[in-house]
Amino acid sequence: MLIRDRFARILRATGLAACILFFGPGCWWQKDSYSSRMRDGFENFEKRAAREAMLGEAFQPAGDFPMWIRPPKPTSLVATPDQFADQFIAWFQGADAGGPLIEVILKGSAGAETLAEFQQGAFNALRAASKFPPQDPERSQEPPEITSMHDNAKMPFDLYQGVGQRQVPGAGGAAGKAAEYQWLIFVGEEQTQKILICFIVPTEKYVEFYRGPLTRCLESLALGGKVATASQTGGGAPAGG
């Protein structure tokens, strides 16, 4: 009996030690996993909140050019193709309280022309609409690498930059004044779709706008098969955060 009792106590002690050894770390692992999920969820919430603060209502054109984009704040839609004879997809503009005007112009094509041919035609359309810089813009040797908020894929763009003076209308119909502006023209292609996004930004707002709303706007662009995903999520649930 004494031997059996002693053996039983040894087994219980061994079992307890095994539980501590094997299940203890598991509990810590579960705690670490929970903490990671909470941290990732909070970071995703912060990203979505930042995007909401920088982007306006989503725009999706009618017709056979599948695309989806959220314009940068403070701009909003002011014209669609029926206002300028199908020359552009859309035109956005706006200004912070008392600030100079910011404009965004979209042009796209699903035709058989090359990207270079599309770009030349788009530049000509901007010239005709008086939305082109005074001097031909220069192509950036280091275009930015844009990551889609819908699937985290890299979106290649050519970037053309120009600078010049524009006459800016004053608030409440007051006399306008000349101000220096930056033109940032992004040209890209995805399968058969070609897209031009022209940002016309006052120099005084350039750095802040480029690092924030402009980049978030480019990240929101969806073409082709990504449009359905963008429409469902509103750009609020990107893959991997």
Image (cartoon, grey):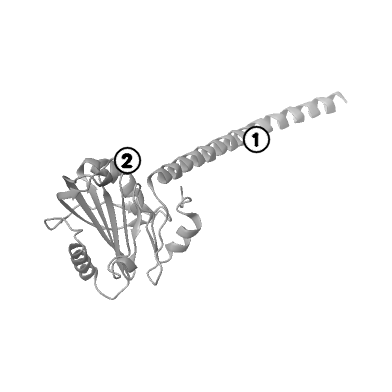
Indicate whether 34 appears above or below 140: above
Q: Which residue is mark 2?
A: 97
Q: Residues within 10 Å of mark 2 (few under 14, many from 20)?
A: few
- Name which residue type carries label 1: Phe
Q: Residue at x 18, y 58 (%)?
A: 132
> Total of numbered circles in the picture?
2
Q: Which residue is mark 1?
A: 23
Q: In which quarter of the view is residue 136 placed?
A: bottom left
Indicate whether 179 appears above or below 92: above
Position of the N terminus by quadrant: top right
Residue 69 location (% of width, % of height): 38, 57
In-front residue for pair 31/158? 158
- Closer to the chain start, of discs 2 and 1, is 1
Q: Nearer the viewer, mark 2 or mark 1?
A: 2
Q: Residue at x 75, y 27 (%)?
A: 10
Horizontal side of residue 226 vs 209, given as left or right: right
Look at the image and tell me whether residue 190 can be seen.
no
Q: Residue at x 68, y 33 (%)?
A: 19
- Name which residue type carries label 2: Ala
Look at the image and tell me whether residue 196 can be seen.
yes
Label 2, secondary structure: give it.
loop
Residue 16 location (% of width, % of height): 71, 29
